[in-house]
Protein backbone atom coordinates (compact mmCIF):
# COMPACT_ATOMS: atom_id res chain seq x y z
CA UNK A 1 0.00 0.00 0.00
CA UNK A 2 1.45 3.36 -0.98
CA UNK A 3 0.30 6.90 -0.35
CA UNK A 4 1.40 8.08 -3.76
CA UNK A 5 -0.55 8.52 -6.98
CA UNK A 6 0.15 5.65 -9.35
CA UNK A 7 1.65 8.09 -11.90
CA UNK A 8 4.28 9.12 -9.39
CA UNK A 9 5.13 5.57 -8.40
CA UNK A 10 5.39 4.57 -12.06
CA UNK A 11 7.79 7.32 -13.13
CA UNK A 12 11.57 7.34 -12.87
CA UNK A 13 11.91 11.05 -12.10
CA UNK A 14 14.00 13.47 -14.09
CA UNK A 15 17.73 13.28 -13.37
CA UNK A 16 19.54 16.56 -14.00
CA UNK A 17 23.19 16.53 -15.07
CA UNK A 18 25.80 15.95 -12.39
CA UNK A 19 26.50 19.00 -10.21
CA UNK A 20 29.60 18.06 -8.19
CA UNK A 21 29.76 20.34 -5.16
CA UNK A 22 33.41 19.62 -4.45
CA UNK A 23 36.54 18.95 -6.50
CA UNK A 24 37.90 21.09 -9.27
CA UNK A 25 36.15 20.01 -12.45
CA UNK A 26 36.21 21.56 -15.87
CA UNK A 27 32.46 21.48 -16.11
CA UNK A 28 31.11 21.05 -19.63
CA UNK A 29 28.07 18.90 -18.86
CA UNK A 30 25.07 21.16 -18.21
CA UNK A 31 25.50 24.04 -20.68
CA UNK A 32 26.25 26.68 -18.11
CA UNK A 33 28.07 29.80 -19.23
CA UNK A 34 31.80 29.69 -18.40
CA UNK A 35 31.99 33.47 -17.91
CA UNK A 36 30.91 35.54 -14.90
CA UNK A 37 27.51 37.25 -15.30
CA UNK A 38 27.05 40.99 -16.01
CA UNK A 39 28.75 43.04 -13.27
CA UNK A 40 25.57 45.02 -12.47
CA UNK A 41 23.94 42.12 -10.69
CA UNK A 42 26.15 42.56 -7.61
CA UNK A 43 24.81 46.05 -7.00
CA UNK A 44 21.24 44.89 -7.65
CA UNK A 45 21.56 42.10 -5.09
CA UNK A 46 23.15 44.43 -2.52
CA UNK A 47 20.28 46.88 -2.93
CA UNK A 48 17.83 44.10 -2.12
CA UNK A 49 19.84 43.25 1.00
CA UNK A 50 19.95 46.93 2.04
CA UNK A 51 16.18 47.18 1.69
CA UNK A 52 15.84 44.04 3.81
CA UNK A 53 14.03 40.78 3.21
CA UNK A 54 11.12 41.18 5.65
CA UNK A 55 8.64 41.86 2.86
CA UNK A 56 7.43 39.54 0.13
CA UNK A 57 8.79 40.28 -3.35
CA UNK A 58 6.69 41.74 -6.16
CA UNK A 59 4.56 38.68 -7.06
CA UNK A 60 4.75 39.52 -10.77
CA UNK A 61 8.34 40.81 -11.03
CA UNK A 62 7.06 43.90 -12.84
CA UNK A 63 10.46 45.60 -13.04
CA UNK A 64 11.76 42.66 -15.04
CA UNK A 65 8.61 42.41 -17.16
CA UNK A 66 8.80 46.06 -18.19
CA UNK A 67 12.47 45.81 -19.14
CA UNK A 68 11.97 42.53 -21.04
CA UNK A 69 9.07 43.99 -23.04
CA UNK A 70 11.31 46.89 -24.02
CA UNK A 71 14.26 44.67 -24.92
CA UNK A 72 12.21 42.27 -27.04
CA UNK A 73 10.10 45.02 -28.63
CA UNK A 74 6.79 43.79 -27.27
CA UNK A 75 3.83 46.13 -26.64
CA UNK A 76 4.00 45.91 -22.82
CA UNK A 77 4.78 43.95 -19.68
CA UNK A 78 1.49 42.03 -19.99
CA UNK A 79 3.34 39.90 -22.59
CA UNK A 80 5.89 38.63 -20.05
CA UNK A 81 5.64 36.07 -17.22
CA UNK A 82 8.55 35.52 -14.82
CA UNK A 83 9.53 32.07 -13.61
CA UNK A 84 11.81 30.37 -11.12
CA UNK A 85 14.00 29.16 -13.98
CA UNK A 86 12.35 28.33 -17.27
CA UNK A 87 11.59 24.85 -15.95
CA UNK A 88 9.03 26.60 -13.69
CA UNK A 89 7.32 28.03 -16.79
CA UNK A 90 7.26 24.64 -18.51
CA UNK A 91 5.60 23.26 -15.37
CA UNK A 92 3.08 26.11 -15.22
CA UNK A 93 2.14 25.56 -18.88
CA UNK A 94 1.79 21.80 -18.47
CA UNK A 95 -0.47 22.30 -15.46
CA UNK A 96 -2.50 25.00 -17.17
CA UNK A 97 -3.11 23.29 -20.52
CA UNK A 98 -2.89 19.52 -20.09
CA UNK A 99 -5.40 17.60 -17.98
CA UNK A 100 -4.97 14.06 -16.67
CA UNK A 101 -5.28 11.60 -19.54
CA UNK A 102 -4.77 14.33 -22.17
CA UNK A 103 -1.84 14.51 -24.55
CA UNK A 104 1.43 16.45 -24.67
CA UNK A 105 3.63 16.26 -27.78
CA UNK A 106 7.38 16.67 -28.03
CA UNK A 107 10.04 15.96 -30.62
CA UNK A 108 12.57 13.14 -30.22
CA UNK A 109 15.38 13.31 -29.27
CA UNK A 110 14.83 16.39 -27.11
CA UNK A 111 14.72 17.67 -23.53
CA UNK A 112 13.93 14.75 -21.21
CA UNK A 113 12.15 16.91 -18.63
CA UNK A 114 9.07 17.35 -20.88
CA UNK A 115 8.19 13.69 -20.45
CA UNK A 116 8.51 13.93 -16.66
CA UNK A 117 6.12 16.90 -16.65
CA UNK A 118 3.52 14.85 -18.53
CA UNK A 119 3.99 11.95 -16.14
CA UNK A 120 3.54 14.09 -13.03
CA UNK A 121 0.38 15.51 -14.57
CA UNK A 122 -1.02 12.05 -15.25
CA UNK A 123 -1.06 12.99 -18.93
CA UNK A 124 0.00 11.01 -21.98
CA UNK A 125 2.91 12.09 -24.14
CA UNK A 126 3.79 11.48 -27.72
CA UNK A 127 7.33 11.68 -29.05
CA UNK A 128 7.70 12.47 -32.76
CA UNK A 129 11.07 11.69 -34.33
CA UNK A 130 12.92 14.48 -36.10
CA UNK A 131 13.65 13.84 -39.78
CA UNK A 132 17.25 12.92 -40.60
CA UNK A 133 17.96 16.55 -41.59
CA UNK A 134 16.57 17.77 -38.23
CA UNK A 135 13.43 19.24 -39.72
CA UNK A 136 10.12 18.01 -38.28
CA UNK A 137 7.79 15.63 -40.10
CA UNK A 138 4.29 16.88 -40.96
CA UNK A 139 2.93 14.58 -38.22
CA UNK A 140 4.37 16.97 -35.63
CA UNK A 141 1.68 19.48 -36.57
CA UNK A 142 -1.21 17.04 -36.97
CA UNK A 143 -4.19 17.43 -34.65
CA UNK A 144 -4.71 14.43 -32.35
CA UNK A 145 -7.30 13.30 -29.83
CA UNK A 146 -6.70 15.08 -26.51
CA UNK A 147 -3.66 17.04 -27.76
CA UNK A 148 -3.33 20.11 -25.50
CA UNK A 149 0.27 21.31 -25.62
CA UNK A 150 3.32 20.93 -27.85
CA UNK A 151 6.89 21.58 -26.68
CA UNK A 152 9.56 22.52 -29.20
CA UNK A 153 13.07 23.26 -27.95
CA UNK A 154 14.70 25.59 -30.49
CA UNK A 155 17.70 25.28 -30.65
CA UNK A 156 17.03 21.70 -29.70
CA UNK A 157 18.80 19.90 -26.89
CA UNK A 158 20.81 17.64 -27.21
CA UNK A 159 21.49 18.41 -30.89
CA UNK A 160 21.71 22.23 -31.13
CA UNK A 161 19.74 22.09 -34.38
CA UNK A 162 16.92 24.48 -35.29
CA UNK A 163 13.50 24.44 -36.86
CA UNK A 164 12.83 27.45 -39.12
CA UNK A 165 10.51 30.35 -38.35
CA UNK A 166 8.35 29.37 -41.32
CA UNK A 167 7.96 25.87 -39.88
CA UNK A 168 6.98 27.30 -36.49
CA UNK A 169 4.30 29.51 -38.05
CA UNK A 170 2.97 26.61 -40.07
CA UNK A 171 2.91 24.33 -37.03
CA UNK A 172 0.99 26.91 -35.03
CA UNK A 173 -1.53 27.25 -37.86
CA UNK A 174 -2.16 23.53 -38.01
CA UNK A 175 -2.03 22.60 -34.32
CA UNK A 176 -5.22 22.72 -32.21
CA UNK A 177 -3.26 23.82 -29.11
CA UNK A 178 -0.43 26.08 -27.89
CA UNK A 179 3.10 25.55 -29.20
CA UNK A 180 5.70 26.37 -26.57
CA UNK A 181 9.00 27.21 -28.27
CA UNK A 182 11.63 26.59 -25.59
CA UNK A 183 14.43 29.04 -26.41
CA UNK A 184 16.71 28.19 -23.50
CA UNK A 185 19.55 28.54 -26.04
CA UNK A 186 17.93 31.23 -28.18
CA UNK A 187 20.55 33.85 -27.34
CA UNK A 188 23.24 31.82 -29.13
CA UNK A 189 21.18 31.18 -32.27
CA UNK A 190 20.96 33.02 -35.58
CA UNK A 191 17.23 33.63 -35.28
CA UNK A 192 14.38 33.25 -32.80
CA UNK A 193 10.59 33.15 -32.65
CA UNK A 194 9.95 36.05 -30.27
CA UNK A 195 8.25 38.36 -32.79
CA UNK A 196 6.07 35.47 -33.97
CA UNK A 197 4.09 35.51 -30.73
CA UNK A 198 2.36 38.64 -32.03
CA UNK A 199 1.11 36.79 -35.10
CA UNK A 200 -0.48 33.79 -33.42
CA UNK A 201 -1.61 33.42 -29.80
CA UNK A 202 -0.73 29.74 -29.93
CA UNK A 203 2.98 30.57 -30.14
CA UNK A 204 4.68 31.08 -26.76
CA UNK A 205 8.42 31.45 -26.18
CA UNK A 206 10.28 30.53 -22.99
CA UNK A 207 13.74 31.83 -22.15
CA UNK A 208 16.19 31.46 -19.31
CA UNK A 209 19.06 33.41 -17.77
CA UNK A 210 20.76 30.13 -16.86
CA UNK A 211 22.63 29.63 -20.11
CA UNK A 212 23.17 32.93 -21.90
CA UNK A 213 23.61 35.16 -18.83
CA UNK A 214 25.78 32.96 -16.64
CA UNK A 215 23.07 32.82 -13.95
CA UNK A 216 22.12 29.15 -13.61
CA UNK A 217 22.54 29.46 -9.84
CA UNK A 218 20.05 32.34 -9.64
CA UNK A 219 17.05 30.47 -11.06
CA UNK A 220 15.26 32.86 -13.39
CA UNK A 221 13.40 32.36 -16.64
CA UNK A 222 10.54 34.03 -18.46
CA UNK A 223 7.76 33.30 -20.88
CA UNK A 224 6.68 35.59 -23.72
CA UNK A 225 3.12 35.23 -25.01
CA UNK A 226 -0.01 37.22 -25.77
CA UNK A 227 -1.56 38.94 -22.71
CA UNK A 228 -4.71 36.80 -22.65
CA UNK A 229 -2.48 33.72 -22.39
CA UNK A 230 -0.28 35.21 -19.65
CA UNK A 231 -3.38 36.30 -17.71
CA UNK A 232 -4.58 32.71 -17.32
CA UNK A 233 -1.11 31.31 -16.61
CA UNK A 234 -0.74 33.74 -13.69
CA UNK A 235 -3.51 31.83 -11.90
CA UNK A 236 -1.44 28.65 -12.03
CA UNK A 237 1.92 29.95 -10.82
CA UNK A 238 3.01 30.04 -7.18
CA UNK A 239 2.17 33.48 -5.75
CA UNK A 240 5.82 34.38 -5.18
CA UNK A 241 7.58 32.14 -7.65
CA UNK A 242 10.59 34.46 -8.00
CA UNK A 243 12.46 35.85 -5.02
CA UNK A 244 13.59 39.44 -4.60
CA UNK A 245 17.23 38.68 -5.43
CA UNK A 246 16.30 36.87 -8.63
CA UNK A 247 13.99 39.63 -9.88
CA UNK A 248 16.53 42.37 -9.18
CA UNK A 249 19.53 40.50 -10.58
CA UNK A 250 17.68 39.32 -13.67
CA UNK A 251 16.49 42.86 -14.42
CA UNK A 252 20.04 44.18 -14.10
CA UNK A 253 21.40 41.35 -16.24
CA UNK A 254 19.15 41.91 -19.25
CA UNK A 255 19.92 45.64 -19.10
CA UNK A 256 23.51 44.85 -20.06
CA UNK A 257 23.17 44.36 -23.81
CA UNK A 258 26.89 44.93 -24.37
CA UNK A 259 27.75 42.05 -22.03
CA UNK A 260 25.30 39.83 -23.89
CA UNK A 261 26.69 40.65 -27.32
CA UNK A 262 30.27 40.11 -26.16
CA UNK A 263 29.43 36.84 -24.41
CA UNK A 264 27.60 35.52 -27.45
CA UNK A 265 30.54 36.38 -29.69
CA UNK A 266 32.97 34.55 -27.42
CA UNK A 267 30.80 31.44 -27.10
CA UNK A 268 30.14 31.23 -30.84
CA UNK A 269 33.87 31.62 -31.57
CA UNK A 270 34.84 28.90 -29.07
CA UNK A 271 32.09 26.67 -30.43
CA UNK A 272 33.84 26.87 -33.80
CA UNK A 273 37.14 25.94 -32.19
CA UNK A 274 35.51 23.00 -30.36
CA UNK A 275 33.83 21.67 -33.51
CA UNK A 276 37.02 21.95 -35.58
CA UNK A 277 39.03 20.19 -32.86
CA UNK A 278 36.51 17.37 -32.49
CA UNK A 279 36.30 16.82 -36.23
CA UNK A 280 40.07 16.68 -36.46
CA UNK A 281 39.95 13.82 -33.95
CA UNK A 282 37.47 11.95 -36.14
CA UNK A 283 34.27 12.80 -34.23
CA UNK A 284 31.06 13.35 -36.15
CA UNK A 285 29.57 16.62 -34.87
CA UNK A 286 26.05 17.88 -35.53
CA UNK A 287 26.14 21.57 -36.59
CA UNK A 288 24.91 23.50 -33.54
CA UNK A 289 23.39 26.92 -32.93
CA UNK A 290 23.56 26.50 -29.16
CA UNK A 291 26.33 26.65 -26.54
CA UNK A 292 26.96 22.91 -26.77
CA UNK A 293 27.53 20.29 -29.43
CA UNK A 294 26.45 16.69 -29.86
CA UNK A 295 29.10 14.33 -31.18
CA UNK A 296 30.00 10.70 -31.48
CA UNK A 297 32.98 8.80 -32.85
CA UNK A 298 32.75 6.12 -35.55
CA UNK A 299 35.04 3.70 -33.69
CA UNK A 300 35.24 4.83 -30.05
CA UNK A 301 32.19 4.12 -27.84
CA UNK A 302 30.95 7.25 -26.08
CA UNK A 303 30.56 6.09 -22.50
CA UNK A 304 34.20 5.09 -21.86
CA UNK A 305 35.28 8.46 -23.28
CA UNK A 306 32.99 10.23 -20.83
CA UNK A 307 34.32 8.10 -17.97
CA UNK A 308 37.97 8.61 -18.89
CA UNK A 309 37.45 12.38 -19.03
CA UNK A 310 35.65 12.37 -15.70
CA UNK A 311 38.56 10.52 -14.11
CA UNK A 312 40.69 13.45 -15.28
CA UNK A 313 38.26 16.01 -13.85
CA UNK A 314 36.64 17.04 -17.10
CA UNK A 315 32.88 16.57 -16.97
CA UNK A 316 30.84 16.23 -20.16
CA UNK A 317 27.44 14.59 -20.66
CA UNK A 318 27.03 11.03 -21.84
CA UNK A 319 23.51 10.55 -23.16
CA UNK A 320 21.68 7.55 -24.52
CA UNK A 321 18.49 8.00 -26.54
CA UNK A 322 16.91 4.58 -27.18
CA UNK A 323 15.87 4.22 -30.81
CA UNK A 324 18.26 6.99 -31.86
CA UNK A 325 21.76 6.58 -30.46
CA UNK A 326 24.10 7.39 -27.64
CA UNK A 327 26.77 10.05 -27.75
CA UNK A 328 28.37 12.97 -26.00
CA UNK A 329 26.93 16.41 -25.37
CA UNK A 330 29.70 18.88 -24.68
CA UNK A 331 29.10 22.46 -23.47
CA UNK A 332 31.13 25.30 -24.91
CA UNK A 333 33.51 26.51 -22.21
CA UNK A 334 36.35 29.00 -22.43
CA UNK A 335 39.07 28.55 -25.04
CA UNK A 336 41.39 27.23 -22.33
CA UNK A 337 38.86 24.65 -21.09
CA UNK A 338 38.19 23.59 -24.67
CA UNK A 339 41.89 23.08 -25.34
CA UNK A 340 42.26 20.90 -22.22
CA UNK A 341 39.28 18.82 -23.31
CA UNK A 342 40.58 18.42 -26.86
CA UNK A 343 44.04 17.44 -25.77
CA UNK A 344 42.68 14.81 -23.35
CA UNK A 345 40.37 13.46 -26.04
CA UNK A 346 43.33 13.38 -28.43
CA UNK A 347 45.06 10.92 -26.13
CA UNK A 348 41.91 8.78 -25.86
CA UNK A 349 40.87 8.25 -29.49
C1 LIG B 1 18.49 24.29 -19.41
C2 LIG B 1 17.19 24.12 -20.12
C3 LIG B 1 15.99 24.61 -19.58
C4 LIG B 1 15.83 25.09 -18.16
O1 LIG B 1 16.55 26.09 -17.76
P1 LIG B 1 16.32 26.76 -16.33
O2 LIG B 1 17.65 26.65 -15.68
O3 LIG B 1 15.24 26.02 -15.59
O4 LIG B 1 15.91 28.12 -16.66
C5 LIG B 1 14.84 24.52 -20.31
N1 LIG B 1 14.84 23.94 -21.53
C6 LIG B 1 15.95 23.45 -22.08
C7 LIG B 1 15.88 22.82 -23.43
C8 LIG B 1 17.15 23.51 -21.39
O5 LIG B 1 18.24 22.96 -21.90
Image (spheres, rainbow, N blue to C red):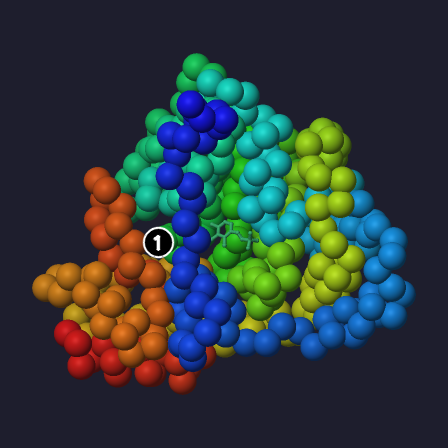
The percent coordinates of residue 156 (x first, y second) are: 41, 50
Quarter of the image where one finds residue 306: bottom left
Looking at the rendered image, the quarter that the N terminus falls into is top left
Please indicate, yes or no, whether residue 55 appears anywhere in the rendered image.
yes
Seen in the picture, residue 75 relative to 50 is either above or below; the reply is: above
Q: Residue furthest front?
A: 1
Camera-side residue of 324 and 17: 17
Horizontal side, residue 268 vs residue 229: left or right: left
Seen in the picture, residue 42 relative to 1 is either above or below; the reply is: below
At 80% from the left and 45% from the top, the residue drawn is 59
Q: Residue furthest left?
A: 299
Quarter of the image where one finds residue 255: bottom right
Please indicate, yes or no, whether residue 104 appears anywhere in the rendered image.
no
At 73% from the left and 64% from the top, the residue drawn is 249
Seen in the picture, residue 343 relative to 72 is either above or below; the reply is: below
Camera-side residue of 274 and 337: 337
Seen in the picture, residue 304 relative to 96 is either above or below; the reply is: below
Camera-side residue of 183 and 346: 346
Label 1 sits on residue: 159
Horizontal side, residue 17 vs residue 310: left or right: right
Looking at the rendered image, the quarter that the C terminus falls into is bottom left
The percent coordinates of residue 312 (x first, y second) are: 29, 78
The percent coordinates of residue 215 (x first, y second) are: 60, 65
* Secondary element at tag 1: loop
Camera-side residue of 254 and 15: 15
At 61% from the left and 42% from the top, the residue drawn is 89
The percent coordinates of residue 4 (x first, y second) are: 48, 28
Amino acid sequence: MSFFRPEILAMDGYTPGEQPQAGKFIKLNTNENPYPPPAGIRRAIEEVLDRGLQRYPDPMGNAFRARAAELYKLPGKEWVLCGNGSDDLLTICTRAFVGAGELLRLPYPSYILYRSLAQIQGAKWQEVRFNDDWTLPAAFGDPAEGLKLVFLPNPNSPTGTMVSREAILELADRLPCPLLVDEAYGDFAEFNAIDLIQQNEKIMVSRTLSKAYGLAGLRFGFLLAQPQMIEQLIKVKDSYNCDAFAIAAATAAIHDEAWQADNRRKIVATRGRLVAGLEKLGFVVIPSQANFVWCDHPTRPARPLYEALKAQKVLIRYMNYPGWKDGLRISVGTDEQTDVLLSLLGSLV
